[in-house]
Structure formats: C-alpha cells, structure tokens
Amino acid sequence: MRKAAITGSGVFTPAQTITNDELVAAFNAFADTQNAAGAEPPIPHSSAAFITSASGIERRYVLDKEGVLDPDRMYPRLPARADDDPSVMAEMARDACNAALAMAGLEACQIQAVLCAASNHERAYPAIAIEIQNLLGTTGFAFDMNVACSSATFGIQAAADMIRAGSIDRAIVVNPEICSAHLEWRDRDCHFIFGDVCTALVLEADDLAQGPRFTIESTRCATQFSNNIRNNDGFLRRTRDQMEDRRDMQFMQNGRKVFKEVLPMVSRHIADHLDSEGVQPDDLTRLWLHQANKTMNDFIGKKVLGRAPTPEEQPNILQDHANTSSAGSIIAFAKHSADLAPGDKGLICSFGAGYSVGSVVVTRSGPA
Ligand code: CO8
C-alpha cells in the first residue's frame, strides 16, 4: 500500500508570554478583591512554586496578555473581525502553514486538502479550514474536525488514510489553538494550564516526496468516554434560561482523575501499537508526547521504554508553552526532529478529553 510522509512542519507562536509569577500576581489580586467583597468560601492564593512543581509549566504564549492579567477582566481581549476579514484562527494557521510548506518545498496550490484539527473553532461555518484554504490558495477541499487534545494525531490519521487510499496526494493538517479564550483564568485549579499556538504539518504521498521526511509507518486512534474533561459551550447556549457566564461553558476538568485514568490508557495504547507493528521500545529514537503535565510524560516515557527516558529521547516543550491542546506533541516534533538520521524511528502521541488517544509511528527517511 502507498505510504504517507510528513515533509514539513511549522509553528506559529504569539508575540506575548505570561510567566507563572505574572499570572499568580494577577490571580492573587483578583482573589484579594473578591475576598474583600466577602467571597464565600474565600478564594485561596495561587502559587508559582505549586504550578511549576505540579505541572512543569513555567510560562505560556498568549494572543492578549493585557486582558488576561487585568484582575478586573481575566480574559483575553480579541476584537471582533468583520465578515470580510480573516478569522484569528485562520491568520495563525496561515503563518504555521506557510512555514510547513516552505520546509516541504511546496507551493500551496499543490495541496489538495486542509484539515483544521483543533479543540475549538472560532465559528461553526463556513469552516475555518475553508477560510485557510482560501488564504493559502490550496486546491481540493477543506474541513474542520475536533477531538480536543488528540485532534492533531486523529487529523494525521485522516489525512494519511486519504493519501494511502489514493484520493489525494498532499494535505495540510493544521492546529490553531486559542486556549486562552476557553480557559477560566479565575479558577485557581486550572488557571495556569493553557497557552495559545498554531502548528501545521504537510503530509505527502511518500513516493512523491524527494527530500528528508518522516514516513508514516502506522497510525492508531482510540476513544473511551469520560466526563472528567468537559465544556458545555455550544450552539444551544442561547436557548438556555440561564444566559449569564456559566462556569461549565469554559474548560472544566477533574485533573487528579484525568491524571490517574489517562496514564494507564495511554501507556497501554502505545505498547499495543508498537507491539502490533513489531517495533521494540528500544527501536525508538524519540517520543514526541502530548504536553499537558511533565510528571505525566515522565511516567508514560518510563512505562513505554522500561526505563527513564533522557530529555533528548523525550523532549518537553510545556515549560515554555504550557498545554496547547492538540498542538503540543506537534510543537515537540517540529522543534526536536531535525537531528534524527535516516532509519531512526519515533512516535508522536497525543491524549486528552474524550478520553482520546492517538499515536503515529514514523521513520526518518530520504536523504541525510
Ligand atoms: N496554587 C497553589 N495551590 C494549588 C493550586 C494553585 N494554583 N491549585 C491547586 N492547589 C492545591 C489544592 O488546593 C490542593 O491542596 P490540598 O492538598 O491542601 O487540598 C493541592 O494543591 C493539590 O491539588 P490537585 O490535586 O488539584 O493538584 P494536582 O497535583 O492533581 O495537579 C494538575 C493539578 C496539574 C491540573 C494535574 O492534576 C494535571 O495535570 N492533571 C492532568 C490534566 C490533563 O492532562 N488534562 C488534559 C486536559 S487538556 C485536553 O484534553 C484538551 C481540552 C481542550 C482544551 C480547551 C482549551 C482551554
């Protein structure tokens, strides 16, 4: 069967960053105001030391720092776009896609499908992906898809399947994540978790690609229902009697349960995937894991390899980006894959809400 390969990657990062200290100062100012006004129960202070030790996150990129850090607002300010202007997500995507196309040495008109795979979409229709198609000048078709944090790997499987089946030769899978707009920055339990970013991958039929590439050997996706990561926002919102700011319309999670339940699911998923492909854990030069929590990644890496992975074998980027939902494992891949030699194998794996888990086994191929 025809194979697909990843021939280009691109990352768009917003210009502004928020450190843990800045974030905690804003949160504590908010808590002090609420407590002075008689908040019941009182809101405890957040702590930068807790954030770093519980998650490994040190800072995050955001589209609008000022709105998030304003204790009277604690929400990004992103001005509305006119109907004829590109959406924020499509603009982020254009930058990431152009970088991926340049790396692949392709023109946009050679791409026949754009999959915008992300946790949230700026509008329901006419699809962010079709807007991206229009901005870039790609041909064929485009569509949006959402599998929360696993959107990118599920998108890779969908695009690779189309290439393997022969319906297209080339696709872009793009993951614009504006997590700052869907995070409750006033919730101490999760206010530190997310950041904004966009990643893009160019996928091509392996037999058409000339340059260095990552041949996709195999993909595997799985879902298993859980309520532990949830948001209830959606098009029925204005039909509800209670219209004001409802906490459940933002990101909600039971982080401890997620931690406990997702770890065995992901470790087992990766082990089964490698086993069915006849790949030994020691055959892997690199693991590009979802970037939610450093302890979680340490655990999964150890379970998969049977020993603690080195930072080179399993690079983390969450200290600089925080959790960027579907984009996390792709940032790790984009930033830490250029040094692999022909024949080296690696595994991209994402996991999150659903629960969902997606894994992609790749081999570095083409010229050195
Ligand atoms: N500062 C100081 N102390 C704190 C803070 C804080 N900010 N927050 C909690 N604490 C305290 C608690 O009060 C508690 O105190 P005590 O022991 O006295 O009761 C103590 O710290 C421990 O609290 P937790 O049990 O909540 O802390 P954990 O050790 O579990 O760490 C984490 C919290 C870091 C959230 C951890 O549970 C975690 O990372 N879990 C996994 C989360 C995960 O992977 N989620 C994936 C979600 S992402 C996804 O799927 C995509 C969704 C779509 C994206 C949408 C965009 C917004």
Image (cartoon, rainbow, N blue to C red):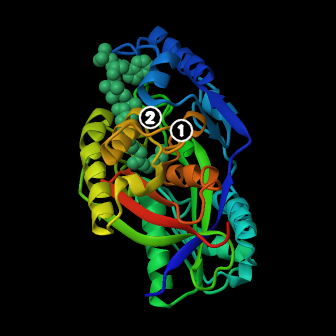
As drawn, the label of residue 331 is none
- Which amino acid type is marked by label 2? Lys
Percent across and percent down for residue 123 are 55, 63
CB contact under 8 Å: marks 1 and 2: yes
- In the image as oriented, which residue stretches furthest toward the bottom? 166
- Find residue 39 and report its image quarter: top left
Answer few, some or many: residues within 10 Å of disc 2's Cα (few below 14, many 20 plus, some between 14 and 19). Answer: many
- Find residue 77 and report its image quarter: top right
Secondary structure under tag 1 reads helix
Secondary structure under tag 2 reads helix
Quick one: 87 or 312, which is closer to the camera? Answer: 312
Decide if residue 119 is in sight here: yes
Which residue is labeled 1 in the image?
318
Q: Find out if the beta carbon at label 1 lies less than 8 Å from the nearest ligand 1 atom.
A: no
In this rendering, position of residue 357 left or right of residue 131 = left
Please state, as top left, top right, bottom left or bottom right, where the C terminus lies in the image: bottom right
Residue at 72%, 83% in the rendered image: 109
Which residue is labeled 2 in the image?
294
Vertical comparison of 4 with 327: above or below: below
Quick one: 361 or 118, which is closer to the camera? Answer: 361
